Image (tube, helix red, strand yellow):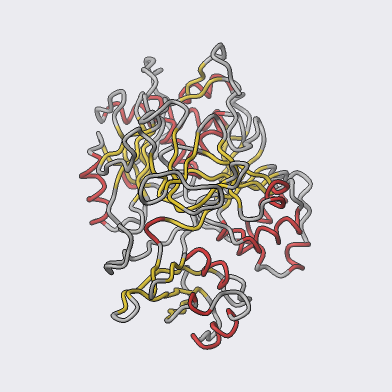
Amino acid sequence: MPSASDPFLPLADVFARVPPEREALLHGSERWTFGELDARSASLAAWLLGKGVEPDDLVAFQLPNGPDFLALTFAIYRCGATPAPLSHRLPPAERDAILSIMQPRCAVDAAMLPASYATTAPIAPRPVAKSWKACTSGGSTGTPKVIVDGRPAGFPAGTSFIGIPAEGRVVVPGPLYHNAPFSAAVFALWNGSTVHTMDRFDAAQALDLIARNCISWALMVPTMMHRIMALPAAVRSTHRFAAWKQVVHTAAPMAPWLKQAWIDWLGPDHIWEVYGATEGLVRCWIGGREWLERPGSVGRPIGNARIRILRPDGTDAKPGEQGEVFAMPPGGPGSTYRYIGAERRATADGWESVGDIGWLDADGFLFLADRRDDLIISGGINIWPAEVEAAILRHPEVRSCAVFGKPDPDLGAVVHAVIESDAALTLESLCAFLADHLARPKHPRSIDVTRQTVRDDAGKFRKPRMTTTEMPA
């Protein structure tokens, strides 16, 4: 942990600290050194200043994964502004809805970027931006909100973050516009590490990249890890991972059987989980060894954040009793972020909802059921999509899936599953398989089977909002 006496190291100053010849970014056949990233980001910073970017402005941008994504990010830091990455695949209407809420100084896409690496005059020092990122979220509803981080664009020397090594080699295969991949890639560069990215996640290619490039740390989501475990054992065994010390997974629940499979493959010290939210209210952290002692836990809060589990009446739940997860960051209420386009859900004394349902054990370890808004109440039975998804993913012909509720005039809601598979799965055959893994009332009542990817590379699937009167308020 850094101390109050440790110097603050702005993100914009990373190029003065890291040798220019060190590799910074690898993406497919592209290989950039820190010196090349420095030159490109300086050129883009001058271009942004010419567009009127001022300190603490939000700069929205839509770029695919690759070196220019991170070059533009650091160019924004050099302007003293805040990067606000958006998916480059957003439909125009959704993009426009986000921008109308965000009101950035400018919005940049790949077609707008100048191609030249022209040398520019040194940029006069700018104040460090008050926020190092502004990420968007639509949740299950598609209604956009912007989450402006409350921390400045830099970190005290000695800062650690989810195991990312200093001067190491890391792979961040997910879409960089999402909060976790963005944070990991930016922090890794600040920490002097080489960052490997991918256009799209491919399980076999990812393992080959990790083995060939002596990767020591990887950030993945459970969807990626399921795809890797679905590879034939002979494919996984062809690689030697002498340098690969840690995989950190986040962003979605991991089925316990899948986590156990990874532990059996690479050992308990290899796999770690971080749980939190873009709002930065709390971060929980757990390694494989602790998880084996408490299967299903996402860990305990770190960094002096606190968690409470509240009943619907606002009173504290007992250990083991399920309720809504509320958190208090170390700096107190409102210290970690601000919303644009949304309101906080908080108690009168400032404890804020994380949006999840879960429980704490007697030692303060957190266990999750699912997202609060995803609960399906079918004929009075509470059904959590994450539990159903975990059971479906056991099927050897299923690559990924997503479960949500559909309104039903009799039961109020019924379970529906969207399944990615090449097989001719039927509802009957699926339910026959699920008989050994899931209680019958929780089985899907309908399914859609597709060969298309169900979840994106961040493990996300936009679930339709339930409108039945049985949904909790």
Q: In the rendered view, tell whether residue 350 sits above or below residue 446.
A: above
Residue extending furthest toward the left: 100
Of residues 279 and 6, the one nearer the viewer is 279
Q: Is 135 left or right of 3, judged from the image as shown? A: left
Q: How many marks?
A: 0
Instruction: Name the spot of residue 449 as percent of width and height, x first.
Output: 46, 79
Q: Is residue 455 left or right of residue 303?
A: left
Q: Identify which residue, 251 or 399, lies in the foreground.
A: 251
Report the residue at 62% width, 28% height from top: 21
Image side of residue 87 versus residue 458, left or right = left
Placement of 302 over or under 444, stated as above or below: above
Q: Percent from the top left, x then y, of residue 467?
A: 27, 67
Looking at the rendered image, the quarter that the C terminus falls into is bottom left
Out of 453 and 12, give the one closest to the viewer: 453
> Which quadrant holds residue 191?
top right
Between residues 420 and 167, which one lies in front from this camera angle? 420
Taking 457 as reference, is 435 left or right?
Answer: right
Q: Vertically, is 300 above or below 49?
A: below
Task: Please provide percent x and percent y for residue 363.
Answer: 63, 42
Image quarter of residue 466: bottom left
> Where in the figure is residue 36, as x and y percent of width and height?
53, 32
Q: Quadrant of the N terminus?
A: top right
